[in-house]
């Protein structure tokens, strides 16, 4: 069975995801959050998303002002990456320190 065509296709998909990943990060870094979020949504629409994409997606949501979405995304990242913490509780404790200061 000749697997050259499927392997070539997978390499092309991987290369395209790599370019999208770099572009999403660059857009986020330049404050173009809406465009970056669209790319992160594409990167996360795979069966096994990269943990780094989940983390950067969470930061992008946070920077864009979607705090609730960021908390959910950080929680998803933590579950995927094996980190054990309650993102909502951690966030509220952190915010409480800033508010009470």
Image (cartoon, grey):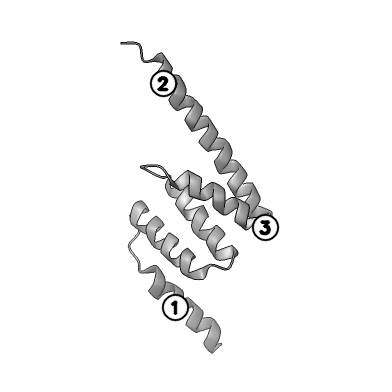
- Quadrant location of residue 32? bottom right
**Label located before the other in sequence (1 or 3):** 3
Residue most toward the top? 1
Secondary structure of residue under mark 1: helix
For the residues labelled 3 and 2, say whether their Cβ atoms are less than 8 Å apart. Answer: no
The image position of residue 70, as x and y in percent, is 48, 64
Tag in front: 1 or 3 = 3
- Residue at 49% across / 59% down in the picture? 58
The image position of residue 91, as x and y in percent, is 45, 73
The image position of residue 2, as x and y in percent, is 35, 11
The image position of residue 97, as x and y in percent, is 50, 83
Query: In the picture provided, is 16 more to the left or to the right than 82?
Result: right
Q: How crowded is mark 3: few (under 14 residues within 10 Å), some or many (20 or more)?
A: some
- Residue at 48% across / 44% down in the picture? 43
Is 9 placed above or below 4 here?
A: below
Residue 36: numbered disc: none
Is 17 placed above or below 29 here?
A: above
For the residues labelled 1 and 3, say whether their Cβ atoms are less than 8 Å apart. Answer: no
The span from disc 2 to disc 1 (Cα, nearest Å) is 46 Å
The residue identified by callout 1 is 92
Secondary structure of residue under mark 3: loop
**Label located before the other in sequence (2 or 1):** 2
Query: In the picture provided, is 86 more to the left or to the right than 13?
Result: left
Residue 31: numbered disc: 3
The span from disc 1 to disc 3 (Cα, nearest Å) is 25 Å
Which quadrant does the C terminus fall into?
bottom right
The span from disc 3 to disc 2 (Cα, nearest Å) is 36 Å
- Quadrant location of residue 29? bottom right
**Closest to the observer, 101 or 32:** 32
Q: Residues within 10 Å of mark 2 (few under 14, many from 20)?
A: few
- Residue at 54% across / 65% down in the picture? 62
Is 75 placed above or below 19 here?
A: below
């Amino acid at each position: 069975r000749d697997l050259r065509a499927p392997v070539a296709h997978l390499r092309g998909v991987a290369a395209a995801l790599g370019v999208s990943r770099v572009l999403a990060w660059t857009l986020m870094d330049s404050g173009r959050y809406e465009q970056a979020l669209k790319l992160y949504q594409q990167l996360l629409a795979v069966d096994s998303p990269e943990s780094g994409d989940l983390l950067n997606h969470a930061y992008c949501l946070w920077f864009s002002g979607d705090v609730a979405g960021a908390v959910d995304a950080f929680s998803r990242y933590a579950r995927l990456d094996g980190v054990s913490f309650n993102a909502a509780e951690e966030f509220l404790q952190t915010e409480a320190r800033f508010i009470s200061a």
